[in-house]
Image (cartoon, rainbow, N blue to C red):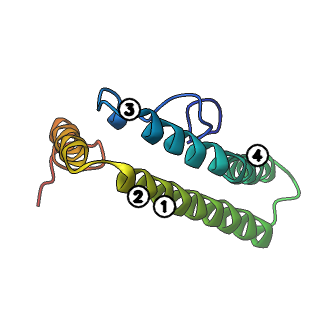
Amino acid sequence: MHGGPGLFGGERMPRLLRGLGLTEAQRDKIFELMHAQAPAMRDKDKEIHKARAELHKLAFSAEYDEARVKALSEAAAAAMAEMAQMRARIEHQIYQLLTPEQRKTVEERKAAFEERRGNGGDGRGPVRG
């Protein structure tokens, strides 16, 4: 997630929700949830980009400082974790708004998506062991 329209900014409905026959009340509540979350998500995105830029700058600098690199990488990781937590929270809040039939459709779509990804869940293909 890197900010911008459609990414919890309220401009677009999440892909899994498209075509579910959402009621106007559901759409309004989802928009409200996404819109309310957008500033915090954008702030975290800025933190991540700033830390990554500083890391890159240090890597190609005579002033390389291992302690500063560690602090920046930890700050970026913390911001990414917070962003993931916020995303999971809002997705759950949206899920709670769905009817049982809509939830079933979403779950089927998610299962089909994971199957297309190769069962590995990470986009790298089937799990082999």
State left or right for residue 89 relative to residue 50: left
Residue lying farthest to the right in this orientation: 63
Residues 35 and 110: in front is: 35
The type of residue carrying mark 1 is Arg
The residue at the point 38 percent across, 34 percent down is 23
Question: CA separation, marks 1 and 4?
Answer: 28 Å
Mark closer to the chain start, 1 or 3: 3
State left or right for residue 104 relative to residue 83: left
Question: CA separation, marks 1 and 3?
Answer: 17 Å
Determine which residue is flagged by label 3.
Answer: 15
Question: CA separation, marks 3 and 2?
Answer: 15 Å
Mark closer to the chain start, 3 or 2: 3
Label 3 packing within 10 angstroms: few (<14), some (14-19), many (20+): few
The residue at the point 59 percent across, 28 percent down is 11
User: With respect to residue 78, does 13 lie above or below?
Assistant: above
Question: Total number of numbered labels?
Answer: 4
- How far across and down, in percent of the image, does residue 60 sit? 78, 46
The residue at the point 36 percent across, 34 percent down is 22
Circle 4 sits in a helix, a strand or a loop, which is it?
helix
The type of residue carrying mark 4 is Ala
Determine which residue is flagged by label 1.
Answer: 89
State left or right for residue 98 relative to residue 43: left
- How far across and down, in percent of the image, does residue 37 sit? 63, 51
Quarter of the image where one finds residue 20: top left
Quarter of the image where one finds residue 109: top left
Q: Are marks 1 and 2 in contact (CB under 8 Å)?
A: yes
